[in-house]
Image (tube, grey):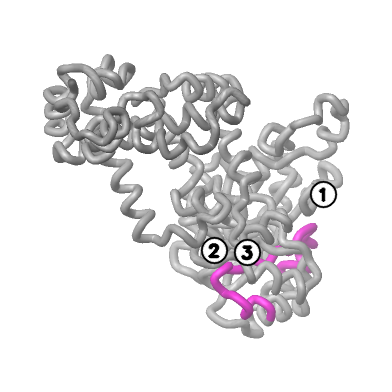
Amino acid sequence: PVATFATATSASTPSVVLLAGLQGAGKTTAAAKLASFLKEREVDYDAVAALSEEERRGLITSRMPVRERKVLLVAADVYRPAAITQLEVLGKSVGVEVFSLGSEVDPVDIARGAVEKAVEEGFDTVIVDTAGRQVIDADLMDELKRIKNAVQPSETLLVVDAMTGQEAASLTASFDSAVGLTGAILTKLDGDSRGGAAVSVRGVSGKPIKFVGVGEKISDLEPFYPDRMASRILGMGDVISLVEKAATEVSDEDAMKMQQKMADASFDFDDFVKQARLVSKMGSFAGVAKMLPGMSGMMDNAKIKDLEKRIKRQEAMICSMTKKERANPELLIKDKTARSRLTRITKGSGTSFDDGMVFISEFQRMRTMMSRMSKQMGGGGAPGGDMEAAMAGGGGMEPPLGNRALRRQAKKKKKGGKGGGRGFGA
């Protein structure tokens, strides 16, 4: 398994997690993300070990038994304006209680009072959000030492911004020598950084990186897997994490239904919207793209933004369709009323007729490719060389609506080089 995380030894001694780091590293947000993770998604490896070998076979992380801790967040950053309010808002959003005594109380007394409350009310985990500084200074380190001596934390985690780069090495060394770290949380890994700071943190402190932040959503905190990080740094993607993210959003039954629809080319516009919304739930398009092998260097921010805009336009067009049209794409591909239908849909969605033609063309090509790829993976498909034919609407299938050049090219192949083609929607 990944690096282990301390648990409560008894009802009277909860596990205390002390978060430290510089300002702007994302400590407060990381505290809320960690609370949500421990409350809902932390794998209970003891329960996993108790499963039979057959039950463990093929079990992915997102489907394993979870521990479900009772967490208390502690607002001990009394210096930054609105830090306490921020933590209270985040705590409410994840259903975790936040302990605070205001901004006029010593952070050491706040941390001590939180632990006493945890013991009295049965909390098994306490997460202390401490104050940060723009630079490492004596006051910061002294306060951290006093809080640590007061609450005796089970975990002292350094929150490091992944964009820090190799500067993370000296930062880690300073905190480790002052308060003694047990691990680190690497934040903002969804940016342009590939995570080289992870190597620096581990190399200098010898302590494990326990979690990585991969997005702005509360759920965007993942356990750190060294092999997966190495794959991301080398630009080889992270397919395993992508599969686990998808598994948390869709059931096995729904996945089988979708696979069957892809295989028999019955994938419709409702399915398209479901898949687009599934990807958005898994995080940003940039984050998902980075998990695909070879894609991290191919799509810059401009291309990703353009893709997101296109998908929003396509969703708007689908929302302007009738239920019958969404369930039966052939009405917009082959039916004689296709042109009038598409004209109505584009006007209703505030898009151009050309946008509609391009979307229908792309949708048909995508549906053709998914069907052929699904059959090939199942052993019943055509040779790989037919992929180009699928892209051009050939291979015995009707060319996609709206792509006139490809339609003419397919016609010429059938008629020995002569031109000609049917009208729109014929």
**Residue at the outermost bottom position:** 138
x%, y% of residue 137? 62, 84
Q: Is residue 260 above or below residue 159?
A: above
Q: Quadrant of the C terminus?
A: top left
From the image, tell me which residue sits under label 3: 233
Mark 3 or 2: the one toward you:
3
| Rendered image: mark on residue 13 | 1
Tell me where the magenta segment starts and ends, as one range: 147-169
Q: Is residue 300 magenta?
A: no
* Residue picked out by circle 2: 26
Q: Nearer the viewer, residue 214 or 18?
A: 214
Quarter of the view holding residue 271: top left
Q: Earlier in the sequence, mark 3 or mark 2?
A: 2
Q: CA distance from mark 3 to mark 2?
A: 22 Å
How busy is the neighbourhood of tag 1: few (under 14 within 10 Å), some, or many (20 plus)?
A: some
Between 53 and 306, the residue placed more toward the observer is 306
User: Image quarter for residue 143?
Assistant: bottom right
Q: Position of residue 52 (x, y in %)?
A: 87, 26
- Looking at marks 1 and 2 on the same chain, the residue that comes earlier in the sequence is marked by 1
